[in-house]
């Protein structure tokens, strides 16, 4: 039922999101140049890797995230417009509209067995952690919300999360972690090293 809902919702909403995605792609091309898309291997259900695709929000080149994230890129992230290409991942069955956010494959060996339960379901474009604090949360808090979603998931909960997501897009908050351009690297001991 969840998979059928995902496909139905994405296809029915295509007349809205496809033209919007084309406009965002053109804006990224004008503001940041090529490439328009950012892709990265992320861990999906069961930890299986897949290639997530987003609109690029950072300038190319060396430097910290803070230095490479332009005002336009901040707008893309705050509005979640950079996530639009992930609807293709949903159609391919690699993601769902709702679920734990997919994280880099390199994190797989860093999770506790409890945290790893977030991979018992398909990752989502939005999720329980995103509507309960997004990047203002610590990693431990995010993972607790992810596992809570795995245990409590239902269509009613998914619809609630989608409704809360719409509100967050209209009034964006918690886009970045305190002191970070986005979110620090997940380290088991709570460090913030980047790789």
Image: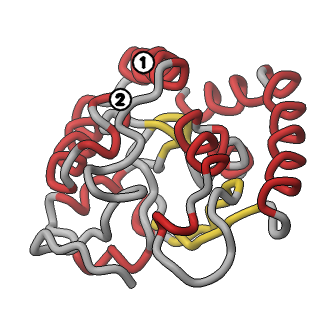
Label 1 element class: helix
Spot occupied by residue 166 in the image (x, y as percentages of width and height) = 53, 19
23 to 188, vertically: above or below: above
Foreground residue, 95 or 195? 195
75 to 157, vertically: above or below: below
Q: Earlier in the sequence, mark 1 or mark 2?
A: 2
Q: Residue at (40%, 63%) from the top-left corner?
A: 46
Q: Residue at (67%, 51%) from the top-left corner?
A: 89
The quadrant the C terminus occupies is bottom left
Foreground residue, 114 or 28? 28
Label ID, residue 164: 1
Residue at label 2?
131
Label 2 element class: helix
Foreground residue, 45 or 173? 173
Q: Residue at (63%, 45%) from the top-left corner?
A: 83
The quadrant the N terminus occupies is top right
Spot occupied by residue 90 in the image (x, y as percentages of width and height) = 65, 45
């Amino acid at each position: 039922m969840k998979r059928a809902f995902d496909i139905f919702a994405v296809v029915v909403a295509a007349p809205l999101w496809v033209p919007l995605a084309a406009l965002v792609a053109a804006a990224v091309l004008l503001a940041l140049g090529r490439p328009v898309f950012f892709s990265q291997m992320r861990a999906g259900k069961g930890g299986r890797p897949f290639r997530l695709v987003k609109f690029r929000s950072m300038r190319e080149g060396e430097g910290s995230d803070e230095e490479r994230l332009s005002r336009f890129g901040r707008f893309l992230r705050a509005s979640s417009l950079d996530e639009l290409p992930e609807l293709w991942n949903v159609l391919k069955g690699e993601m769902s509209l709702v679920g734990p956010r997919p994280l880099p494959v390199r994190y797989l060996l860093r999770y506790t067995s409890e945290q790893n339960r977030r991979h018992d379901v398909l990752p989502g474009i939005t999720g329980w952690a995103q509507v309960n604090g997004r990047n203002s949360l610590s990693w431990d808090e995010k993972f607790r919300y992810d596992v809570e979603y795995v245990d409590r998931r239902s269509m009613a909960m998914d619809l609630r999360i989608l409704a809360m997501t719409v509100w967050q897009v209209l009034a964006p908050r918690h886009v970045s972690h305190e002191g970070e351009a986005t979110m620090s690297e997940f380290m088991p001991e709570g460090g913030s090293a980047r790789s």
